[in-house]
Image (cartoon, rainbow, N blue to C red):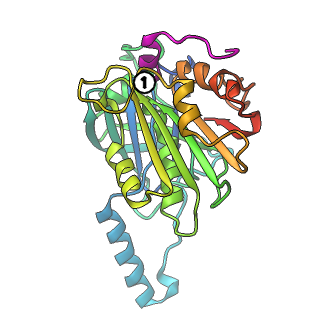
């Protein structure tokens, strides 16, 4: 998209609801990092692997302390479930499904052993695979999302990975900006968790998050907690396509005027901008990726505002 072309009003709706590019049943990508598999799934879009719940972390810490009392020989090294390379597909059991909103669920998959870890790095990805006759579609290219939404414990699903994405390390950038649409928020949340769970990481974060309605905003409570805890380092801006009358945030689409106002200037040193969402968001903000492994040329609003190819990463 050369320049800032006009964006139809319903384009922002597609930011949050469009399905991913076609690729068949085994092409659904999950972003990850954690001990138990947990992913948010919105129809046509995918989600992430999160840390275990507090009670699970407490149990593991208790087991480690007890093992240390008995001697280091009794401590079993954690095994990585996903090793990449030639490992092949890993079959996991669905343990829990939680309804998040009208079109999004959170799925928790158990790893093969209770002491295993996922093996996923921050913002790495997984593929999923399912073969079955009941792949009726709610979205033209979203059969895997349809299947996931129909799953119930203890059904199983195959995963493969990890697929490396952007390699993150503490203080790699002074300031990161996250531009997301719909469930494209998931790798962004993984970055936020990595940054703010690490006391030595001083990275500043600006989030711009587009959705259809307020109930579609995933993880809003978590981001509000970050704003309250780190007011000098984290800021979030929300844009809604169909806001209620009482909505005080941005309205319409993620536009050049908003980004020019809330993002650091292009000349800012050691700045990185991450983009993730459905095709409509990429086309308007940064241009599409050339392929899963190739970023493609920078275009759209970010280029018009003066940001460079090296400053932008497309998930």
Which residue in the protein does label 1 denote? 16
Quadrant location of the N terminus? top right
**222 up-or-down from 57: above or below:** above
Specify whether residue 241 is in view. yes
The magenta stretch spans residue 284: no
| Element marked by disc 1 | helix
Is residue 248 rendered to the left or right of residue 263?
left
Quadrant location of the C terminus? top right
- Of residues 284 and 216, the one nearer the viewer is 284
The magenta stretch spans residue 11: yes
Q: Residue at coordinates 53% horizontally, 57% vertically from top-left?
A: 194
Position of residue 252 measured from the top left corner of the image (x, y, whole percent): 42, 20
**173 up-or-down from 241: above or below:** below
- Of residues 48 and 111, the one nearer the viewer is 48
Specify whether residue 165 is in view. no
Q: Residue at coordinates 63% horizontally, 40% vertically from top-left?
A: 273
Is residue 242 rendered to the left or right of residue 298?
left
Is residue 294 rendered to the left or right of residue 186?
right
């Amino acid at each position: 998209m050369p320049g800032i072309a006009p964006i139809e009003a319903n384009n922002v709706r597609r930011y949050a609801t469009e399905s991913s590019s076609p690729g068949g049943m085994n092409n659904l990508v999950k972003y990850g990092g954690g001990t138990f598999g947990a992913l948010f799934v919105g129809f046509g879009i995918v989600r992430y692997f999160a840390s275990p719940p507090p009670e699970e972390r407490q149990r593991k810490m208790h087991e480690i302390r007890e093992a240390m009392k008995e001697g280091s020989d009794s401590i079993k090294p954690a095994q990585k479930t996903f090793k990449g390379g030639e490992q092949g597909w890993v079959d996991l059991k669905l343990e829990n499904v939680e309804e998040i909103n009208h079109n999004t669920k959170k799925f928790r998959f158990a790893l093969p052993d209770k002491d295993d870890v996922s093996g996923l790095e921050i913002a790495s990805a997984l593929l999923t695979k399912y073969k079955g006759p009941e792949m009726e579609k709610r979205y033209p290219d979203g059969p895997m999302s349809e299947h996931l939404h129909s799953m119930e414990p203890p059904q199983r699903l195959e995963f493969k990975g990890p697929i490396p994405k952007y390699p993150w390390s503490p203080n790699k950038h002074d300031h990161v900006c996250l531009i997301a649409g719909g469930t494209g928020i998931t790798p962004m949340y993984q970055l936020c968790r990595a940054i703010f769970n690490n006391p030595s990481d001083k990275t500043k974060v600006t989030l711009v998050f587009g959705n259809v309605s307020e109930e579609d905003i995933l993880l809003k409570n978590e981001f509000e907690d970050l704003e309250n805890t780190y007011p000098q380092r984290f800021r979030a801006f929300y844009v809604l396509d169909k806001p209620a009358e009482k909505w005080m945030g941005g309205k319409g689409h993620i536009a050049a005027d908003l980004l020019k106002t809330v993002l650091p200037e292009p000349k800012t040193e050691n700045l990185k901008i991450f983009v993730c969402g459905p095709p409509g968001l990429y086309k308007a903000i940064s241009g599409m990726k050339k392929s899963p492994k190739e970023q493609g040329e920078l275009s759209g609003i970010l280029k018009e505002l003066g940001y460079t190819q090296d400053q932008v990463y497309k998930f």
